[in-house]
């Protein structure tokens, strides 16, 4: 599903070179639910952005769903993002003036599938909203929704095109513990329905929803363990 | 990269909702375009209205009329072309009458100043005009009372005359002047008819001038040897007026024995020439108006560019998100171009509406001769085309900037 080899990312800021990733190897199989953890600045977001095709690695290879995407053109990457990737952000990124339904339909604007009827678009968006249990908030605008509900709309938007992978960079970073559980329940359920999920988080409670934890430090994989062993290791350390 | 119809419908919907959400700002931004389009369409409306009324007047005045004047060729010494040589003679007019099949009417006209007297008054320096009966048809001026001259008046050199209303008033003749007598240069003339007042407001517009007409033969006799003749002719239709003019030129050259290569000693003019002159004047003014619109659209365009840059920077996060869910650079570019164009077209639409209202206002100004003022369809299309072009041209740079935004940086904005 996702295979990353010797992934490197170097940022140049003036004279200085910042090695955000120093050679990461990873494999994530179909229908896994994986947490990425690590201190601030360890390279989690950089890794997520590359896997999410929002950014290109400086070196290394990346294969997504059988496609080598590391050196694709920008337009091709846009297509990959549209069809294969669902991205959830910490701060929701909903369009304020649009309803929940319109926000969820957004990826279809850029879809390759020509000739979708408006009824079909709506049907898909409603189905996605149903999967995040927001069927009763379809015509609400973001300012009429709670933080947890906003993040669920964002998840519905991410799963609209049935992506190969659903990724989230600190999706609960702006939420309290009650709504965190509300959102994580949705991820757990989507995973149960067969979705591959990759979540960046600081919180052990969030990681606890996953089966496997990858820990980064200074741009390298520090550990990659099943959740039980990882949590045990944390207690010892 | 093909963008779907759904993309376009959403992009236009988004553009309209953006304009509406920032309606004050949009209005201020589009003001340059609105003012430019409104002022130009108004000027064009006024001009085309003026053109219509002037052309109708020309037509009623007689688009198929031809004038013939004696004319000394330019740059030729006076002694080679003495006055007598270029003067139009009565027999030449007779020859033209028989040799020009495209003419419907032709008359010589000779004018001279004399003193006129009636029982009540004596007037000095009044212009008397000698004409043939064809004059009425050639100049399109009928007799409203009495009769026109006949052959016998002309051939018998009878002392009869036609007056207009001003002449009757000035000579203090009875209201029914036909049958009265007046003295022209001391000779007794019988008033046989009243000529209608000149209708045209454009040429010889002073309908208050006293006019006195006498038979052409009499007028020549009264002037002794020094007379001046011009000719007024009417072609059978406006279509053949050029041909009729050519016939007159050919005939004159033939009867005057002008050798090929030698210049004309006369000048024939069709009224079309005046129409052409007016038309070129009008299109000159239209071109100036178009230049004005060009400048104001340029100014408007800079405003558009500025506001689009503001919009791109305000919506950086939105652009990042759209890219994250699969928008290609081309899609982002197209969306912002459409937004600039929709903004400009909306401005153009408001401008055209204001121009139309202005045109309606113009038609209501009494005496302004703008009753036909209207924004022509081509001006409407041109306004929209210009507005769209401004949107495209000045929206390009902001759109390019938006399309090149890096999605990660865009999402980190603010
Ligand atoms: N656009 C950038 N330019 C320069 N340095 C960057 C940029 N993005 C991230 N970095 C640097 O790369 C390292 C990894 O950052 P990031 O992946 O955001 O870490 P995390 O998400 O784990 O906190 C940090 O040192 C950060 O400062
Ligand atoms: Mg981060």
Image (tube, helix red, strand yellow):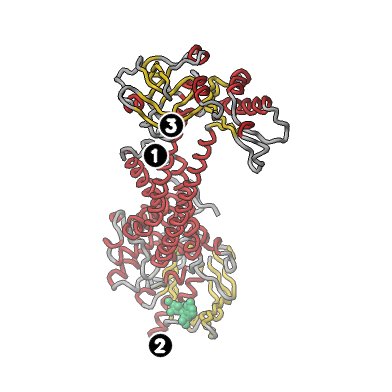
Task: Please state the horizontal and vertical placement of residue A170, each as a whole percent of the image.
Answer: 39, 73
User: For the residue labelled by badge 1, is the local secondary structure a helix, a strand or a loop?
Assistant: loop
Give residue A237's mark: 2
Residue B134 sits above or below residue A166 on the image? above
Image location of residue A236, percent across then percent down? 40, 87
B77 vs B294: above or below: above
Quarter of the displayed picture in which ligand 2 can be seen: bottom left
- Tally of marks: 3
Q: Chain of mark 3?
A: B
Q: Which mark is residue B57?
A: 3
Which disc, if any, is residue B374? Answer: 1
Which marked residue is nearer to the observer: mark 3 or mark 1? 3
Location of residue B161 (image quadrant): top left
Measure the alpha-carbon separation of dots 1 and 2.
87 Å
Evaluate whether residue B4 shows in this view: yes
Q: Residue at x 40, y 62 (%)?
A: A190
Mark 3 or 1, nearer chain start:
3
Measure the C-alpha gap from mark 3 to mark 1: 18 Å
């Amino acid at each position: 599903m996702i295979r990353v080899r010797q992934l490197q990312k170097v940022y140049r800021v003036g004279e200085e070179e910042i090695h955000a990733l120093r050679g990461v190897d990873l494999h994530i199989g179909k229908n896994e639910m994986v947490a990425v953890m690590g201190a601030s600045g360890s390279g989690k977001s950089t890794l997520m952005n590359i896997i999410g095709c929002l950014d290109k690695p400086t070196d290394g290879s990346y294969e997504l769903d059988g496609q080598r995407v590391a050196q694709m053109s920008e337009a091709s990457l846009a297509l990959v993002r549209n069809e294969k990737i669902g991205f959830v952000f910490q701060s929701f990124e909903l369009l304020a003036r649009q309803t929940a339904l319109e926000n969820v339909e957004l990826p279809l604007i850029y879809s390759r599938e020509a000739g979708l009827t408006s009824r079909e678009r709506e049907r898909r968006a409603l189905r996605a909203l149903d999967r995040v249990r927001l069927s009763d908030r379809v015509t609400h605008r973001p300012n009429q929704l709670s933080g947890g509900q906003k993040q669920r709309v964002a998840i519905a938007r991410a799963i609209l095109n049935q992506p190969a992978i659903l990724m989230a960079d600190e999706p609960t970073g702006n939420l309290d513990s009650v709504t965190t559980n509300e959102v994580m329940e949705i991820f757990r359920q989507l995973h149960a329905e067969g979705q591959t999920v990759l979540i960046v988080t600081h919180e052990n409670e969030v990681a606890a929803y996953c089966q496997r934890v990858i820990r980064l430090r200074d741009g390298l994989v520090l550990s990659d363990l099943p959740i039980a062993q990882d949590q045990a290791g944390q207690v010892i350390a | 990269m093909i963008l779907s119809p759904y993309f376009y419908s959403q992009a236009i919907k988004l553009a309209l909702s953006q304009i509406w959400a920032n309606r004050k700002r949009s209005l201020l931004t589009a003001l340059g375009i609105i003012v430019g389009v409104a002022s130009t369409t108004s000027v064009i409306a006024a001009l085309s209205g003026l053109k219509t009324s002037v052309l109708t007047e020309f037509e009623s005045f007689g688009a198929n009329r031809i004038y013939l004047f004696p004319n000394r060729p330019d740059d030729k010494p006076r002694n080679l072309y003495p006055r007598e040589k270029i003067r139009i003679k009565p027999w030449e007019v007779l020859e033209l009458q028989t040799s020009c099949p495209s003419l419907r009417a032709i008359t010589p006209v000779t004018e001279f100043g004399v003193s006129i007297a009636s029982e009540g008054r004596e007037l000095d320096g009044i212009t008397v005009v000698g004409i043939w009966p064809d004059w009425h048809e050639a100049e399109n001026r009928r007799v409203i009372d009495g009769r026109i001259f006949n052959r016998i008046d002309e051939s018998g050199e009878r002392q009869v005359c036609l007056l207009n209303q001003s002449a009757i008033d000035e000579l203090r003749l009875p209201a029914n002047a036909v049958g009265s007598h007046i003295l022209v240069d001391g000779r007794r003339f019988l008033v046989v008819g009243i000529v209608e007042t000149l209708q045209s407001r454009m040429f010889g517009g002073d309908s208050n001038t006293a006019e006195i007409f006498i038979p052409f033969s009499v007028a020549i006799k009264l002037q002794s040897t020094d007379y001046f003749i011009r000719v007024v002719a009417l072609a059978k239709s406006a279509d053949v007026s050029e041909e009729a003019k050519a016939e007159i030129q050919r005939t004159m050259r033939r009867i005057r024995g002008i050798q090929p290569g030698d210049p004309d000693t006369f000048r024939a003019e069709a009224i079309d020439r005046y129409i052409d002159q007016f038309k070129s004047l009008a299109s000159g003014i239209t071109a100036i108006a178009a230049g004005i619109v060009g400048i104001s659209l340029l100014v408007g365009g800079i405003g558009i560019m500025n506001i689009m840059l503001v919009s791109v920077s305000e919506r950086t996060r939105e652009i990042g998100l759209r890219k994250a869910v699969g928008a290609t650079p081309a899609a982002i570019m197209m969306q912002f171009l459409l937004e600039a164009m929709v903004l400009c077209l909306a401005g153009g639409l408001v401008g055209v509406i204001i121009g139309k209202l202005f045109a309606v206002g113009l038609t209501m100004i009494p005496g302004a001769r703008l009753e036909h003022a209207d924004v022509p369809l081509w001006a409407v299309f041109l306004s929209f085309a210009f507005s769209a072009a401004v949107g495209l041209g000045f929206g390009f740079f902001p759109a390019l900037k938006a399309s090149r935004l890096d999605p990660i940086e865009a999402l980190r904005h603010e």
